[in-house]
């Protein structure tokens, strides 16, 4: 007697992947079989072990400017990054927030999304997201185990081994292909031209504001940095470009002309028309590349820089859908409003506690710190704000301190748990030069620093106006979130 297993199999596939997957030409047998496999639960120890293996590779901060290794791995894996369209994002500040906004917009228009961002705030799994959620530890571990033998093959053939970032990038591209996603939103690690992510053929490239950062790797002028970052623009594609320093703008436009790409410029083809502070965020009016205005959009994030990110995200999604080129109809305003209203960006002026108010912000370069300081003055009514500060040692620490000094009554310098953190004694010396000795306090542990800052903030007795700003690096923010129960 023959048993027909196909009805049961068909139902199982639908339950796991959805009906659209069965009609997709991108889905192969491997994807279907992997979808049917029940991933065994992994312990914290197993995820920690995989993370340790990845961290033991060349670190993110060690750059060998070559795409040869990632290209070789993509070839072995069957070019998974070419099985879906993508939107590629570079720039100095605002990349992750813009990526999250683009993702939210696309999901509201019923597309299945994959998002790749870095660095992570708390868990390494945050770097790879499907449908707006970080992938599970089980999927992260299994994806690593799946590609691990092929990574070893590439390592054996190359003069230098694959780096941490290259391997995690490959994991993201493989995950997105296996899902499968309708579109991937990919944030570069550093730069653009030689960044491991730059093996995709993005239909839309986004360049957020460029400022001086990673100058030892990208160059010491915004023009040189723009040269690296504009390397993500693809021939015949669309480049959505934020307002830039003049020398950077010239480099980007020259690159676009050379490869026959279309450019949409903030302030010209799209931008922020109006912005009003609102409870819990801001109310904005945006003009898209179609020329249409999108009014009364509530954005639950603070600061002019986040409104700018929203304009970039909207223009990128319009470009992805062909608005302003293939057709002139704007995006559905109700869906746009719903998407932006649901945006979040952990660690970006994120309020994690009240009485006193504790705000986390990942500003780690002078341009980012200036945006943070401006947004704090606009969105919060602090009568006394105390900073908790722990940066990485390779940053322009003095520049960040100078940007924050006008809004901080006092500052508590400390040290996060990583080797990249600037030594607290050296940090204290720099802080005293900017704030003076009477406004600088030193605590060697982050938890003690937060407690000290809370006490200092409350000294004036105005609890409603007391606040603590924790900033300096993503790593500091991640550790603070854990300490504060987020």
Image (tube, grey):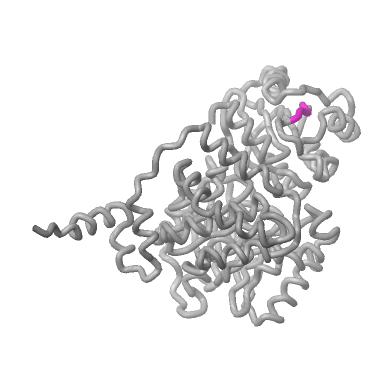
Corner quadrant of residue 158: bottom right
Residue 68 percent across, percent down from the top left: 68, 66
**Which secondary structure dominates the residues rendered in magenta?**
strand
Quarter containing the N terminus: bottom left
Q: Nearer the viewer, residue 160 or 284?
A: 160
- The residue sitting at the left extreme is 1
Q: Nearer the viewer, residue 61 or 327?
A: 61
**Position above or below: 42 against 446:** below
Residue 475 percent across, percent down from the top left: 67, 38
Q: Is residue 413 magenta?
A: yes
Residue 160 percent across, percent down from the top left: 73, 57
Write the residue at 55% across / 60% down.
313
- Left or right, 421 with respect to 86, comes to right
Quarter containing the C terminus: top right
Q: Is residue 228 magenta?
A: no
Q: Say whether residue 395 is visible.
A: yes
Q: How many marks?
A: 0
Instruction: Please report the bounds of the magenta region as a residue range.
Output: 411-415
Write the residue at 59% across / 40% down.
51
Q: Say whether residue 134 is visible.
A: no
Corner quadrant of residue 350: top right
- Left or right, 235 with respect to 33, comes to right
Write the residue at 68% across / 33% down.
470
**Position above or below: 70 against 300:** below
């Amino acid at each position: 007697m023959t048993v027909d297993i196909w009805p049961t199999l068909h139902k199982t596939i639908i339950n796991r992947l959805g009906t659209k997957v069965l009609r997709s030409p991108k889905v192969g047998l491997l994807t279907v079989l992997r979808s049917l496999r029940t991933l065994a639960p992994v312990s914290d120890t197993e995820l920690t072990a995989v993370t340790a293996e990845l961290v033991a590779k060349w670190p993110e901060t060690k750059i060998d400017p070559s795409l040869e290794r990632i290209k070789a791995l993509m070839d072995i894996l069957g070019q998974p990054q070419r099985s879906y369209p993508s939107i590629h994002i570079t720039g100095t500040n605002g990349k992750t927030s813009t990526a999250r906004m683009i993702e939210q917009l696309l999901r509201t228009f019923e597309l299945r999304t994959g998002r790749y961002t870095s660095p992570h705030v708390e868990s390494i799994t945050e770097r790879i997201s499907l449908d707006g959620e970080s992938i599970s530890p089980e999927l992260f571990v299994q994806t690593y185990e799946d590609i691990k033998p092929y990574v070893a093959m590439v390592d054996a053939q190359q003069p230098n081994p694959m780096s941490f970032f290259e391997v995690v990038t490959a994991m993201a591209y493989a995950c997105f292909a296996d899902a499968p996603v309708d579109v991937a939103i990919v944030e570069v690690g550093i730069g653009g031209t030689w960044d491991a992510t730059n093996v995709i053929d993005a239909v839309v490239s986004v360049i957020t504001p460029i400022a001086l950062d990673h100058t030892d790797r990208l160059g010491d002028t915004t023009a040189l940095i723009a040269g690296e970052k504009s390397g993500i623009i693809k021939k015949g594609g669309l480049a959505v470009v934020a307002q830039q320093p003049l020398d950077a703008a010239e480099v980007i436009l020259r690159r676009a002309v050379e490869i026959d790409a279309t450019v949409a410029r903030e302030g010209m083809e799209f931008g922020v028309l109006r912005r009003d502070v609102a409870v819990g965020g801001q109310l904005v009016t945006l003009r898209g590349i179609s020329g249409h205005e999108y009014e009364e959009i509530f954005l639950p994030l603070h600061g002019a820089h986040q409104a700018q990110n929203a304009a970039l995200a909207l223009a990128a999604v319009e470009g992805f859908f062909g608005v302003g080129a293939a057709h002139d109809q704007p995006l559905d305003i109700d869906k746009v409003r719903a998407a932006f209203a649901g945006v979040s960006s952990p660690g970006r002026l994120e309020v994690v506690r009240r009485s006193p108010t504790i705000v986390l912000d990942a500003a780690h370069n002078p341009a980012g710190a200036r945006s943070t300081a401006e947004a704090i003055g606009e969105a919060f009514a602090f009568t006394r704000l105390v900073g908790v500060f722990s940066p990485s040692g390779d940053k322009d620490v003095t520049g960040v301190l100078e940007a924050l000094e006008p809004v901080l009554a006092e500052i508590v310098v400390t040290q996060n748990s990583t080797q990249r953190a600037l030594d607290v004694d050296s940090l204290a010396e720099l802080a005293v030069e900017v704030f003076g000795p009477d406004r600088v306090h030193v605590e060697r542990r982050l938890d003690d620093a937060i407690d000290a800052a809370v006490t200092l903030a409350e000294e004036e007795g105005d609890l409603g106006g007391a606040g603590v700003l924790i900033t300096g690096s993503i790593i500091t923010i991640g550790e603070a979130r854990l300490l504060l129960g987020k």
